[in-house]
Amino acid sequence: MMAGVTVRSICIGQPQPFNGAEMSAVAKLPVSGDAEIRDFGIVGDMVADTRVHGGIDMAIHHYPRDHYDWWRERLGPHPLLDSANAFGENIVASGLTESDVHIADRFRLGTAVLEISQPRQPCWKIDHRFGVKGMAAEVVRSHRSGWYYRVLEEGFARAGDELHRIEKGHEDWPVARVFAKIYDKTSQPQREELEAIASLEGLSDKLRHRVRKAIC
């Protein structure tokens, strides 16, 4: 088993008014005690728009705490960057970034087993949450996207547990590279790169479908 990183907190949230009639569960709070991890995600955590969020391939969101200082350099002392989870992440931890992890990497967290399924696609809600225009575009330019896990084995975890990588997935396809080839127009992906991404075992069905459409 590879060395793990300590999880600072596990966060959940419910949909709340966000922008007029728009609802969002991006504002999450740390779980006290054990968090129950099920195949649909963490018990007590919900999404507002099931068309684009949630489901077994996007059960748990991880955004690297490592990026917070980078954002402070650009935004200044924004209060959200001092909160438990500024980007709506479920897992709050430092020590892993999009360049370190790969599609289909598997991790043990507490008694649960998770598998990376796809990068997180940024949307306008990041701009609105921070009150800063252009943040979603900056995520695309910097490839600081975060990622999603699916749950392979249900279980329990809590703050202070270690997230251990127990199996590497596609080592040629770290999350940062997959994100760049799909979302960053400056990356100019070749057809063979998109075909390779579409064939990755463990990639979410939704993203696989998007890549296949791009190939056509």
Image: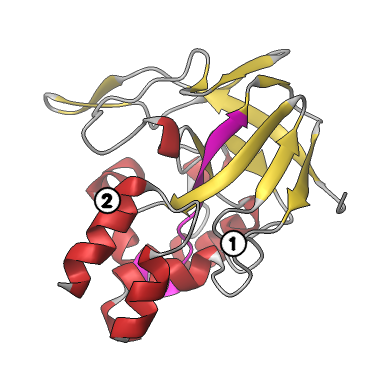
Image point (68%, 13%), residue name: 32
Splitting the image into 4 quarters, where does residue 7 fall? Answer: top right
How many marks do you count on the picture?
A: 2
The reply, left or right, for residue 138 in relation to residue 41 is left
Coordinates of residue 148 in the picture (x, y in percent): 49, 44
Is residue 19 positioned above or below 199 on the image? above
The span picked out in magenta is: 140-152
Residue for badge 1: 102
> Is residue 194 one of those drawn in magenta?
no
Query: In front: 157, or 113?
Result: 113
Residue 81 placement (x, y as % from top left): 54, 46
- Type of amino acid under label 1: His
Which secondary structure lies at badge 2?
A: loop
Q: Give the residue type at disc 2.
A: Cys
When the figure is inspected, residue 21 is found, relative to residue 121, above or below; the finding is above
Q: Is residue 76 visible?
A: yes
- Is residue 144 highlighted in magenta? yes
- Along the line of sight, the residue nearer the viewer: 76 or 11: 11
Residue at 41% in and 51% down: 120
Q: Mark 2 points at which residue?
A: 123
The relative height of residue 213 versus residue 207 in the rendered view (above or below) is below
Residue 126 placement, left or right of 68:
left
